[in-house]
Amino acid sequence: MTKLEEKQALCNRHRALLEILLKYGTSGVMPLPQLRALCLAWGLYPSTQAVNRAVRELRAAEILNRQTWVDNNSDLLLARKFVWRYFAGKDSQETATPRRPATMAPYILQARKIDWLLSMVEREHLATLEAAETYLRRHGCTVFLRLSDLPDYYRRYAPALSAENPENYREQLARLDADTAQISALALRQPEKIPSPSVATLAQAHRRGIYILGISPSRRTVTLALFAGRRTKAARVMDWLIDAQAWVNSLLLYYSCTLVVYALDNAHRTTLRAALTAPAPGRKITPYWRERLIQHHLGGLVRIAVKDTDFISRWCGGIHRTDCF
């Protein structure tokens, strides 16, 4: 058996593990403890040791690489070019080398999303990868969608998104298609300015780190998530929430929003809550977050919650990296 055939056979044997790595990791990158937790939650391997053996085999075959995670102890797994080649069914010349971020910050953000996914899998008893995917699609969740996925998202949920304001829907979809074409042209080193209407889209929220957790037509509500960093101030949270509500109402008339702000730890939650609930300037009683909503005629229409995820302790060994968080 040639080296290429050996790699192909290993990818066949561990296809589901590699699929999870590409689907939920940033550029095919994920901390090993989280990959292990997902594989075990979905019954792909019988034990922690079995997952570790699979990873060692894939690393030995130069299908995966590793570097040290922020806890200075665990592995951060990185899919090599062959993984994309395997899933695309292309040869090496037809497959682009994956781009890596210059800092750990994007990997931290993705790890926080995976932390949310694991909590959801446990809470909803989603015993397979397919069950989790079905759940995310049924709720219209965008947490794991890339910007290039958003035009397809608009089309998939067209019955809901276009029902009340079809003109705005078409305009926003045109903007998303134009942005995606522009990104593709830049990736091919063929920059092209594509005229598109200046309208707010879901892409703006995604660039700010705000994602849809779920849409409920029966309750006429949209639940959003923000994985806030320590530098995210209350004013920025409210700016983004007000813009997000404006986007929701551009398509879904009379829907309300609930923003769930996920904090890194209890100290982070306490700081954010204190800033959001402090009396607004010039007010003795009205909290800052409510005053901002009243100013934009959104009083009673928007809710906000700040939750402690204990992310630093559970996934980062209690180590705080100021350049990442």
Image (cartoon, grey):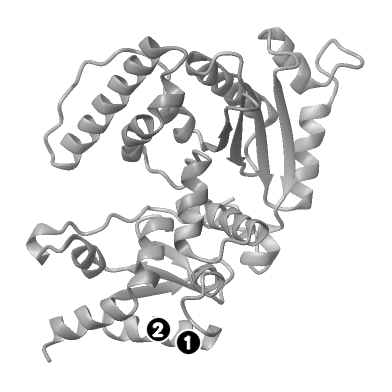
Q: Work out how far the residue at label 1 is from the one at label 2, CA to CA, in angstroms.
A: 6 Å
Q: Categorize mark 1 by other alpha carbons within 10 Å: few (<14), some (14-19), many (20+).
A: some
Farthest residue, direction right: 284
> Please, what is the three-letter code of the amino acid marked with disc 2?
Ala
Which mark identifies residue 301?
none
Q: Report the residue at 71% width, 57% height from top.
A: 310
Left or right relative to 226: residue 52: left
Rendering coords of residue 258 (x, y %):
67, 30
Q: Name the residue carrying label 1.
A: 50
Badge 1 element: helix
Circle 1/circle 2 CB separation < 8 Å: yes
Q: Report the residue at 38% width, 17% height from top.
A: 169
> Please, what is the three-letter code of the amino acid marked with disc 1?
Ala
Q: Report the residue at 49% width, 72% height from top.
A: 39
Location of residue 318 with respect to 66 vertically, above or below: above
Badge 2 element: helix
Q: Quadrant of residue 62?
A: bottom left
Location of residue 81 with respect to 226 vertically, above or below: below
Left or right relative to 32: residue 65: left
Viewer-closest of 206 and 302: 302
Viewer-closest of 155 and 51: 155
Q: Name the residue carrying label 2.
A: 54
Farthest residue, direction bottom: 1
Rendering coords of residue 193 (x, y %):
18, 22
Q: Quadrant of residue 236?
A: top right
Left or right relative to 265: residue 251: left
Viewer-closest of 311 and 2: 2
Location of residue 63 with respect to 89 vertically, above or below: below
Please identify the quadrant where the N terminus is shown.
Answer: bottom left
